[in-house]
Image (cartoon, grey):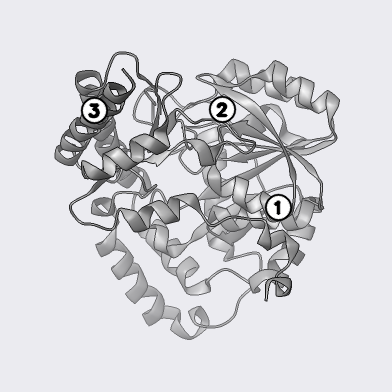
């Protein structure tokens, strides 16, 4: 039976996080493990109204097959938002609507990667990207991620030493660490990559969720000809729509469309129509402001409780936006061992190991603050502090 499976899928493990979420199904467990937006801020009323409006006004068309590129008004909305918020001129024809930004990663793999293709990635990096590119049997070159972005010298060395085709990164409120690249780092990345032929894959699913400080320019601003943008509506509207996008030059987009047609013909057209109507009828910036304010409170509660309940030796990030923060335990401690203790205390998180494409991260862990209210965060971090002290006591 084993021989029936393709080599490219046989070598890819199940999602580590999905397996953890099975363990945390117990309602008594406070979970910081998932990467879920907070459902309390889904625009249910607005989506219901948009759905009725679309079906009443153009239901027969909205229920039909459509084009692979996606609904033109939705692509135009995305292009206008890039222009208004980032000062970047993008033609709607350079955008394709995908089944979430995760499908964008798969289409990039289909379009750009061969077996054995070399790819740069943050270390630690987004698990979904590691999985997506592993299917194509890519060779990973992890580049150390610091608080202000990737180590650019390390990136330069990798580009000189290996035939890297693409570098994948999440410059804003990175998953899993919450780190944001500084403007200086973005400029340096563009300068270094400008001397090579590799493309920068700039994934920005959390960019709208800034609750501290000011927005910074996309890497695309400094590397316009060799940046492929990924985006998502999941974090600012509703993830069940599974609506994201790829933005790339037309020569790349032509091949992306072929890959998209071969994958699923087109993204759910009814969802596109409903979301587009919802965006046309409502103030998305007002909605995002509500989410930002809530996530900022939740992040502050988590940081406050970490300071109160974690041992001083534990290090943590303090993100300016997004949904995650990153914990580094003292050297020699294992987040996998801590996970077992924490489950006994009825609290869960994601150990850091799966975020490292080539190994490492044994003493690291990711915490999600977006999907828990302040009361759950306070109790959950207290329990996690107890768990850490129990583990450290065993090692004393």
Q: Which residue is mark 3?
A: 385
Q: Which residue is mark 1?
A: 108
Question: Is the residue marked by circle 2 packed among few (<14), some (14-19), or many (20+) residues within 10 Å?
Answer: some
Q: Which residue is mark 2?
A: 217
Q: Is residue 309 visible?
A: yes
- Identify the residue at horizontal 64%, vertical 72% (top origin): 264
Question: Is the residue marked by circle 1 packed among few (<14), some (14-19), or many (20+) residues within 10 Å?
Answer: many
Marks 3 and 2, the one that precedes in the sequence: 2
Q: Residue furthest bottom?
A: 60
- Identify the residue at horizontal 31%, vertical 47% (top origin): 287
Disc 2 element: loop
- Identify the residue at horizontal 56%, vertical 41% (top origin): 82
Q: Gap between marks 3 and 2, in whole Å?
A: 37 Å
Closer to the camera in the image, 143 or 280:
143
In this image, 333 relative to 194: left or right?
left
Q: Is residue 22 above or below residue 248?
A: below
């Amino acid at each position: 039976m084993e021989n029936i499976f393709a080599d490219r899928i046989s070598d890819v493990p199940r999602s580590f996080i999905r397996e953890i979420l099975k363990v945390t199904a117990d309602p008594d467990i406070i979970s910081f493990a998932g990467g879920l937006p907070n459902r309390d801020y889904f625009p249910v009323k607005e989506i219901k109204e948009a759905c009725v409006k679309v079906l009443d006004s153009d239901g027969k068309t909205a229920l039909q097959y459509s084009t692979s590129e996606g609904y033109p008004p939705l692509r135009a909305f995305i292009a206008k938002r890039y222009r208004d918020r980032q000062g970047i001129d993008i033609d709607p024809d350079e955008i394709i609507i995908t089944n979430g930004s995760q499908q964008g990663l798969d289409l990039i793999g289909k379009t750009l990667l061969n077996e054995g293709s070399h790819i740069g990635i943050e270390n630690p990096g987004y698990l979904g990207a590691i999985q997506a590119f592993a299917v194509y049997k890519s060779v990973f070159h992890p580049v150390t991620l610091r608080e202000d972005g990737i180590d650019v010298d390390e990136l330069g060395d990798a580009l000189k030493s290996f035939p890297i085709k693409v570098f994948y990164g999440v410059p804003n409120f990175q998953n899993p660490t919450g780190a944001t690249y500084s403007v200086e780092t973005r400029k340096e990345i563009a300068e270094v990559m400008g001397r090579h032929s590799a493309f920068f894959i700039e994934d920005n699913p959390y960019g709208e969720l800034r609750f501290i400080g000011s927005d910074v320019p996309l890497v695309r601003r400094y590397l316009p000809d060799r940046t492929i943008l990924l985006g998502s509506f999941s974090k600012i509207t509703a993830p069940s729509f599974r609506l994201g996008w790829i933005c790339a030059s037309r020569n790349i987009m032509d091949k992306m469309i072929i890959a998209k047609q071969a994958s699923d013909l087109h993204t759910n057209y009814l969802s596109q129509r409903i979301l587009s109507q919802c965006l046309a009828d409502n103030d998305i910036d007002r909605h995002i402001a509500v989410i930002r304010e809530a996530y900022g409170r939740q992040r502050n509660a988590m940081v406050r409780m970490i300071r109160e309940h974690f041992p001083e030796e534990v290090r943590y990030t303090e993100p300016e936006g997004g949904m995650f923060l990153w914990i580094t335990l003292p050297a020699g401690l294992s987040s996998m061992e801590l996970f077992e203790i924490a489950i006994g205390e009825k609290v869960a998180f994601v150990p850091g190991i799966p975020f490292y494409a080539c190994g490492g991260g044994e003493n690291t862990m990711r915490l999600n603050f977006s999907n828990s209210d302040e009361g759950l965060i306070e109790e959950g971090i207290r329990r996690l502090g107890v768990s850490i002290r129990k583990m450290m006591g065993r090692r004393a």
